[in-house]
């Protein structure tokens, strides 16, 4: 059953930053886009690059390995060489905790 799980605190993730977190065996990339938090799978669907280490421009992250682009807010793929999007997960803030629903 899906549940919200604390993955970080808001002080750990400044606006514009990303962080890899592990939740129930899943590697998830957590992003702070100007104060709103978004969680998508960390693993690029092309060859497994770490999206939490990619460059973020607006709401788009570029995979650091070969440049595929994904929408941070939905996981949708926006640019090759990846062809499939990644999963996205609901987030919420409780006090100063960032929680992800997995
Ligand atoms: S592993 Fe991400 S673009 Fe190749």
Image (cartoon, rainbow, N blue to C red):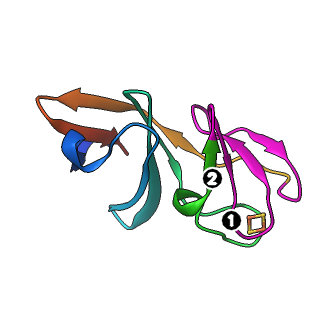
Q: Is residue 58 magenta?
A: yes
Name the side, left or right, on which 10 lies relative to 77: left
Residue that carries the numbered disc 2 in the rendered image? 55
Q: State which image quarter holds ligand 1.
A: bottom right
Name the side, left or right, on which 19 lies relative to 6: right
Mark 1 vs ligand 1: CB under 8 Å? yes
Find out whether the residues at labels 2 and 1 contact each other: C-beta distance under 8 Å: yes
Alpha carbon distance from label 2 to label 1? 7 Å
What's drawn in magenta, residue-wise? 57-82
Viewer can see residue 3:
no
Q: Residue at x 34, y 39 (%)?
A: 101
Residue 18: percent from left, percent from top: 45, 51
User: Can you tell which mark lies on residue 25?
Assistant: none
To which quarter of the image does residue 67 belong?
bottom right
Q: Say few, some or many: other residues with alpha carbon within 10 Å of mark 2 (under 14 / 14 to 19 / 20 or more).
A: some
Q: Is residue 25 magenta?
A: no
To which quarter of the image does residue 72 belong?
top right
In the foreground, 75 or 24: 75
Mark 2 vs ligand 1: CB under 8 Å? no
Q: Say few, some or many: other residues with alpha carbon within 10 Å of mark 1 (under 14 / 14 to 19 / 20 or more).
A: some
Residue that carries the numbered disc 1 in the rendered image? 64
Which callout, 2 or 1, points at the residue further toward the start of the chain?
Answer: 2
As helix, strand or loop, the secondary structure at mark 2 comes to strand
Q: Main secondary structure of the magenta part?
A: loop
Q: Which part of the image, by quadrant, shows the C terminus?
A: top left
Residue 30: percent from left, percent from top: 43, 48
Residue 81: percent from left, percent from top: 88, 59
């Amino acid at each position: 059953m899906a549940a919200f799980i604390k993955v970080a605190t808001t002080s750990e993730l400044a606006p514009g930053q990303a962080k890899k977190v592990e939740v129930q065996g899943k590697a998830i990339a957590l992003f702070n886009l100007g104060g709103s938090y978004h969680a998508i799978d960390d693993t690029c669907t092309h060859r497994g690059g770490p999206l939490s280490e990619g460059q973020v421009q607006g709401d788009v992250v570029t995979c650091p390995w070969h440049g595929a682009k994904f929408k941070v807010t939905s996981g949708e793929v926006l640019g090759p060489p990846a062809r499939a999007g990644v999963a996205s997960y609901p987030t919420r803030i409780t006090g100063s905790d960032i929680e992800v629903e997995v």
